[in-house]
Image (spheres, rainbow, N blue to C red):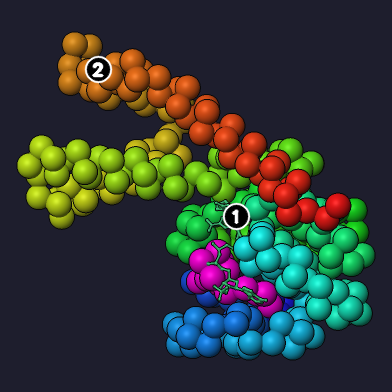
């Protein structure tokens, strides 16, 4: 079985590791590397995986290296690892937003690199990831990448950096939009006087029900919405309220802001 090292073991790495284990991946074949002893102890206890505070040691023992540190520290994290990476030639998968293939290659060396944009629902096997390979990635390495990300949800290959920025706007950042919407619904229900626990239970089940229906049915989301919206009924008033507030523009602006920020990050943080 392929051994996977995670350089950086925070939220995103934890989500992918958790999803892999849930899917039956051998814990012995997962190595988490992180400066935090506490984080590592927690991961070891929860998943029974291998842990280390030594990135080079983790890389030497693995076939696939997943880079899951914050974009702001990627350059400094890779600098001491470049020689080992070039020597051992693992498949490198970076999940960092705003760090493009060019920068990764400058900092990590001439390797097979997949730039991946995952999302945190990977933790529950419902991830959605975009993948961009450089031309050193073999078909076999593509299939290994699909297996890893496939264990935690669905993945799609894209052809260029711009398309990966679009993936970031849709699914990378997307879970936060739905969480925010849930927060707003729970708060509004509380303001009406509903008990918080009840508001939460109903909101979450409604989100799950709507997503499951949209995914399982052949009917498009707009028709599913119309099916809920009885003429002159209650839903119609809510939809009108959203539309009058310019929801389509609010969403469009938010997603364009993601793409803009990704492009800025490439300029701010990327290799010159
Ligand atoms: N969260 C999300 O929804 C998504 C995140 N991403 C990307 O995933 C990456 C990680 O994000 P996230 O998991 O949220 O961040 P976290 O801060 O939760 O995780 C990053 C981890 O890397 C550790 N770290 C810092 N320096 C090193 C080092 N030298 N060697 C090894 N580990 C180190 C950090 O430790 P310490 O805290 O001690 O510094 C931290 O535990 C980012 O690049 C982000 O763009 C992509 C898609 C979705
Ligand atoms: O907010 C971020 O920068 C990361 C990338 C996508 C989701 N979280």
Q: Nearer the viewer, residue 19 or 104?
A: 104
Q: Quadrant of the N terminus?
A: bottom right
Taking the image as shown, residue 17 lies to the left or right of residue 164, namely: left
Q: Residue 149, image x and y in percent?
A: 63, 60
Indicate the secondary structure of the residue bearing disc 1. Answer: loop
Choose top left, top right, bottom left or bottom right for residue 240: top left
* Residue at image mark 1: 118
Residue 67 vs 40, above or below: the answer is above
Where 135 falls versus 77 (above or below)? above
Q: Is residue 265 above or below residue 59?
A: above
Residue ID at (75%, 70%): 76
How dense is the environment of label 2, judged by Cα within 10 Å: few (below 14), some, or many (20 and up)?
Answer: some
Regarding mark 2 in the picture, which secondary structure is present there? helix
Judge whether residue 45 is colored magenta: no
Q: How many marks?
A: 2
Tell me how far mark 2 sits from mark 1, CA to CA: 35 Å
Q: Is residue 13 magenta?
A: yes
Q: Give percent across and percent down for residue 43.
A: 49, 81
**Foreground residue among 225 and 7:** 7
**Horizontal side of residue 101 vs 37, given as left or right:** right
- The residue under the point 14% across, 44% down is 190
User: Which numbered marker is on residue 126?
Assistant: none
**Is residue 148 at least partly visible in the picture?**
no
Q: Is residue 64 left or right of residue 125?
A: right
Q: Position of residue 263 (x, y in %)?
A: 70, 41
Q: Is mark 1 within 8 Å of ligand 1?
A: yes
Stretch of the chain drawn in magenta: 5-19
Quadrant of the image where one finds ligand 1 = bottom right
Residue 221 pos. (x, y %):
43, 28
Q: Nearer the viewer, residue 16 or 210?
A: 16
Q: Is residue 125 above or below residue 242?
A: below
Residue bearing the label numbered 2? 236
């Amino acid at each position: 079985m392929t051994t996977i090292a995670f350089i950086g073991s925070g939220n995103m790495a934890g989500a992918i590791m958790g999803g892999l284990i849930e899917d039956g991946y051998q814990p012995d074949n997962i190595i988490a590397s992180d400066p935090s002893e506490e984080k590592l102890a927690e991961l070891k206890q929860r998943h029974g995986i291998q842990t280390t505070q030594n990135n080079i040691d983790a890389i030497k023992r693995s076939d696939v290296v997943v880079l899951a540190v914050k974009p702001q520290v990627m350059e400094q994290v890779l600098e001491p690892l470049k020689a080992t990476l070039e020597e051992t030639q693992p498949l490198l998968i970076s999940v960092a937003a705003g760090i493009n293939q060019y920068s990764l290659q400058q900092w990590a060396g001439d390797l097979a690199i997949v730039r991946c944009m995952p999302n945190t629902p990977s933790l529950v096997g419902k991830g959605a990831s975009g993948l961009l390979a450089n031309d050193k990635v073999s078909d076999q390495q593509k299939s290994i990448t699909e297996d890893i990300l496939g264990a935690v949800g669905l993945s799609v290959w894209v052809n260029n950096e711009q398309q990966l920025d679009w993936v970031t706007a849709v699914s990378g950042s997307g879970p936060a939009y739905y969480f925010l919407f849930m927060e707003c619904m729970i708060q509004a229900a509380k303001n009406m006087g509903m008990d918080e626990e009840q508001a939460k239970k109903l909101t979450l089940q409604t989100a799950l029900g709507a997503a499951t229906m949209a995914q399982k049915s052949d009917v498009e989301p707009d028709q599913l919405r119309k099916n809920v919206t009885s003429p002159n009924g209650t839903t119609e008033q809510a939809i009108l309220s959203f539309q009058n507030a310019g929801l389509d523009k609010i969403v469009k602006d938010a997603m364009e802001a993601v793409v803009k920020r990704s492009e800025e990050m490439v300029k701010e943080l990327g290799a010159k």
